[in-house]
């Protein structure tokens, strides 16, 4: 596989040409290219950053975030609909954080807001301290990579060509790939064990093969945050387990935060990691239960609200942030206080959420219940 130029999949034109006057390339001794004249010869050869330029790896943080759908304007306008509000959550570098919740709980709305695919109603989303909403499109694409469930028509593109599209934020207007870009594409394919798919057409791949290529494309962007919406939706059981295992390796190897949504609680629990669990409106915070589960499992999360109080006595809507860090350090278990009409979001190691009964409260129905001992759902 050898890709020399990024091509737009729908027209055969150089997709790098869309950079225009708004495109920014930083190279050499800090020179900035803004379109117009041809890019310097070393476009795409990113210079080694100085220590002062390297951002502190704090991962993903949402601060007092409210998500939903804004109201209309004019007569007959619809009112804004708030799905989740007052969220303070973190996804730490080196860990996979899984977003869990029943159908209609707001997982996709929250994920799309974090990915800047729809505006937040309030609050902010930060990656390594940078406000995603204030970044330019190119800077955001170098910080955040997204893998969605929506399919697209790849035409005659091969797996390697699709992965090379991930280099778009880093190349010049001609779309030519440098040796560094080709190396990044090769590393992304290797990370997802997809080297053998580089010369195969994407349209002819199985769902599992296609998903590996799409994740590799996202990794080729070299993001600080990887967001995936239901990445295992079309995969069989072995492929789901393998994908989560690969994503865990990616998080550690690249030192990035990985956030994914999933309906497959059983596989998520088997894989381990951190979780954001969207409960039912007005549900309990589970702070005490999480502490009890932590003691049984040898952990000591001791969930606290931002003002130092226990979740059960926190001010209405107060959310607790987990610890941040790098190198695979897990989040502390945290929770929001139960408030009538408000949907709680609990975060922490997924095994603690299971042992505390939080997963039962979020998913149990009249016919089906979650069994924490086996980590499975069972008919009552």
Image: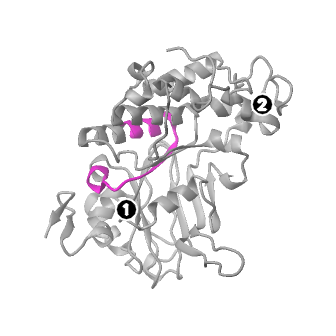
Question: What stretch of residues is rendered in magenta?
Answer: 246-268
Residue at 40% x, 50% y is 230
Which structural element holds mark 1? loop
Residue 92 lies, in percent from the top left, at 50, 50
Looking at the image, the residue that sits furthest to the left is 380
Residue 232 visible: yes
Residue at 49% x, 27% y is 188
Which is more foreground, mark 2 or mark 1?
A: 2
The circle drawn on residue 300 is 1
Looking at the image, the residue that sits furthest to the right is 37
Direction from residue 31 to residue 254 in the image, left or right: left
Q: Residues within 10 Å of mark 2 (few under 14, many from 20)?
A: some
Along the polypeptide, which appears first: circle 2 or circle 1?
Answer: 2
Residue 194 position (above or below residue 133): above
Residue 260 lies, in percent from the top left, at 44, 50
The residue at which mark 2 appears reads as 26
| Marks 2 and 1, how far apart at CA | 45 Å
């Amino acid at each position: 596989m050898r890709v020399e130029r990024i091509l737009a999949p729908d027209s055969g034109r150089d997709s790098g040409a869309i950079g225009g006057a708004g495109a920014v390339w930083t190279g050499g001794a800090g020179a900035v290219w803004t379109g117009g004249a041809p890019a310097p010869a070393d476009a795409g050869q990113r210079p080694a950053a100085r220590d002062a330029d390297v951002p502190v790896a704090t991962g993903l943080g949402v601060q007092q975030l409210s998500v939903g759908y804004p109201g209309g304007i004019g007569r007959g306008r619809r009112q804004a609909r708030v799905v989740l509000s007052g969220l303070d959550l973190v996804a730490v570098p080196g860990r996979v954080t899984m977003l869990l919740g029943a159908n209609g709980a707001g997982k996709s709305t929250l994920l799309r807001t974090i990915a800047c695919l729809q505006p937040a109603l309030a609050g902010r989303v930060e990656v390594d301290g940078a406000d995603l909403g204030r970044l330019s499109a190119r800077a955001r694409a170098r910080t955040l990579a997204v893998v969605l469930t929506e399919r697209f028509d790849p035409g005659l593109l091969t797996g390697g060509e699709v992965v090379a599209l991930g280099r778009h934020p880093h190349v010049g207007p001609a779309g030519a790939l440098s040796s560094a870009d080709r190396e990044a594409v090769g590393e992304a394919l290797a990370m997802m064990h997809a080297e053998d798919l580089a010369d195969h057409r994407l349209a002819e791949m199985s769902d599992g093969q296609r998903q590996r290529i799409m994740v590799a494309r996202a990794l080729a962007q070299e993001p600080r945050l990887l967001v995936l919406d239901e990445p295992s939706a079309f995969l069989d059981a072995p492929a789901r387990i393998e994908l989560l295992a690969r994503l865990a390796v990616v998080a550690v190897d690249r030192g990035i935060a990985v956030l994914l949504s999933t309906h497959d609680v059983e596989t998520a629990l088997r894989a381990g990691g951190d979780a954001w669990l969207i409960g039912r409106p007005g549900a309990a915070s589970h702070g005490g239960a999480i502490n009890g589960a932590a003691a049984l499992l040898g952990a000591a999360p001791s969930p606290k609200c931002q003002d130092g109080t226990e979740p059960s006595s926190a001010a209405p809507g107060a959310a607790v942030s987990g610890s941040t860090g790098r190198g695979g350090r897990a989040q502390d278990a945290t929770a929001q206080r139960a408030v009538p009409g408000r949907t709680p979001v609990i975060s922490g190691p997924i095994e603690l959420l299971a042992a505390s009964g939080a997963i039962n409260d979020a998913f149990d129905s009249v016919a089906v219940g979650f069994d924490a001992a086996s980590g499975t759902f069972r008919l009552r």
